[in-house]
Amino acid sequence: MPPLIVTAAIIEEQGRFLVTRRPDDCRHAGLWEFPGGKLEDGEAPEQALIRELREELDLDIEVAGIVDVLHHRYDWGAILLLAYRARILGGRIRHLGVAEHRWVRPDEMLALPFLPADAPLVRKLAGT
Ligand SMILES: Nc1nc2c([nH]c(=O)n2[C@H]2C[C@H](O)[C@@H](COP(=O)(O)OP(=O)(O)OP(=O)(O)O)O2)c(=O)[nH]1
């Protein structure tokens, strides 16, 4: 099986990153991640990211350059995580598909229980 392609938005405002916690009723419940999700059939990664941010948080975003590409094997299969810089264009955060959100400084981000695939990305963003 090829890896599942997943997109993630790296949104930074005034030195803080937007991170979200996965709901209780899903795979990897309760862990922290960068908002985003799987590509749907025929979708470009940037489109998927824009759609997911609307669906999960009710935010309109603009997607900028790629920050990192990470491969990780979970026990259920592998993912290829595409992380893009993004900027909020409008909207007010609603928890439509997440348990909660936080704006965190890099040191706070390092202390959160993140999804395992994200560990190298979190360290890179925190400059450690
Ligand atoms: N959005 C996002 N997903 C991530 C990150 N890191 C990471 O390992 N993932 C994984 C968790 C999920 O298994 C997958 C993203 O899938 P998703 O959130 O669209 O869907 P899901 O697995 O909750 O949904 P489903 O299979 O139950 O329909 O990628 C990340 O930083 N952001």
Image (cartoon, rainbow, N blue to C red):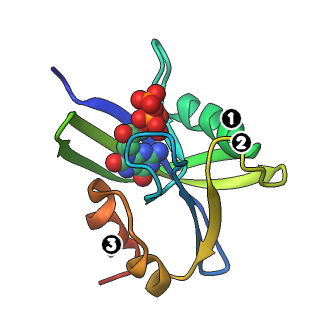
What residue is pinned by disc 3?
Answer: 124
Query: Label 2 sits on what residue type?
Result: Leu
Residue at horizontal 32 percent and vertical 72 percent from the top: 124
Foreground label between 1 and 2: 2
Disc nearer the start of the sequence (3/2): 2
Number of numbered tags placed on the structure image? 3
Foreground label between 3 and 2: 2
The image quadrant where one finds the N terminus is: top left
What residue is pinned by disc 2?
Answer: 96
Q: Is residue 83 visible?
A: no
Query: Label 1 sits on what residue type?
Result: Glu
Residue at horizontal 43 percent and vertical 58 percent from the top: 31
Query: Label 3 sits on what residue type?
Result: Lys
Foreground label between 3 and 1: 1
- Give the CA separation, mark 3 to mark 1: 27 Å
Q: Is residue 124 above or below residue 114?
A: below
What residue is pinned by disc 1?
Answer: 55
Disc nearer the start of the sequence (3/1): 1
Assign a secondary structure to mark 1: helix
